[in-house]
Amino acid sequence: MDNYGLWYQFHFYLFGFIALLSSIAFVTRRSPVAAVMWLVVTMFCLAALYVMLDAQFIGAMQVLVYAGAIMVVFLFVIMLLNLGEPSEFADARGLWAKLLAAVVGIALIGEIALVTRTGVPSGQYTVPRTFVTDQVARYGAVGAVARPLYTDYSLAFELTSILLLVAIAGAVMLGRRGEPDAR
């Protein structure tokens, strides 16, 4: 295997492993704010995987729409409902957790510096350019993504929107659990 293959494989497993760990941390947090922050880490790792698969538009939309807009809405709902004391929002309480966060942060900064210095190799692990250019020429850059999303994958797209609606309704119900019935 050449250097590119090792580079690609290492980063694929790295981002996959971080996404897996952060999604486990997301479902095991007691603080809703800490859980949302772990979900943001998961979304960024998924965006990195999309970029590695040469789907930069989808990676950018992952960051803008999911890690940006939807997580802001979740945080707004959580803060609006006032689900706890401010001291409960801290996820990293001990010295070891803070040291681990610092080490992970330094490692990610090192990754960014390495990619910036050496450049991102391209080539053998991407979708054939003829397919991509044909789709973009026919439907445009956004249309090449939107057409299959709203035709072939419309059920998954709609189920995702329902899942987000249920999550917001669940956050409202969690916020109301301590209030007396207002009938």
Image (tube, rainbow, N blue to C red):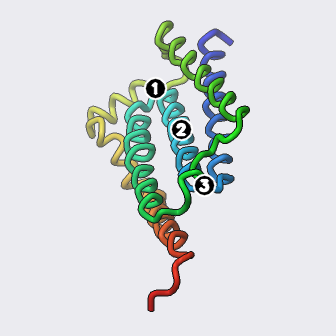
Residue type of the residue flagged with mark 2: Leu
Q: Position of residue 115 (x, y in %)?
A: 51, 14
Indicate the secondary structure of the residue bearing disc 1.
loop
Q: Which is nearer the N-term, disc 1 or disc 3?
A: 3
Mark number, residue 152: none
What residue do we see at 68% from left, 53% from top?
28
Q: Which is nearer the N-term, disc 2 or disc 1?
A: 2
Of 178 and 164, nearer the camera is 178
Q: Nearer the viewer, mark 2 or mark 1?
A: 2
What residue do we see at 51% from left, 18% from top?
112
Indicate the secondary structure of the residue bearing disc 2.
helix
Q: Quadrant of the C terminus?
A: bottom left
What residue do we see at 52% from left, 78% from top?
179
Residue identifier under label 2: 46
Residue type of the residue flagged with mark 3: Ser
Q: Is residue 163 above or below residue 86?
A: below
What residue do we see at 46% from left, 26% from top?
128
Indicate the secondary structure of the residue bearing disc 3.
loop
Q: Which is nearer the N-term, disc 3 or disc 2?
A: 3
Q: Position of residue 66 (x, y in %)?
A: 43, 47
Examine the image and state in which quarter residue 131 appears.
top left
Q: Position of residue 68 (x, y in %)?
A: 40, 44
Mark number, residue 128: 1
Marks 2/1: CA–CA distance = 22 Å
Question: Among all residues in the image, which is located at the extreme top?
Answer: 117
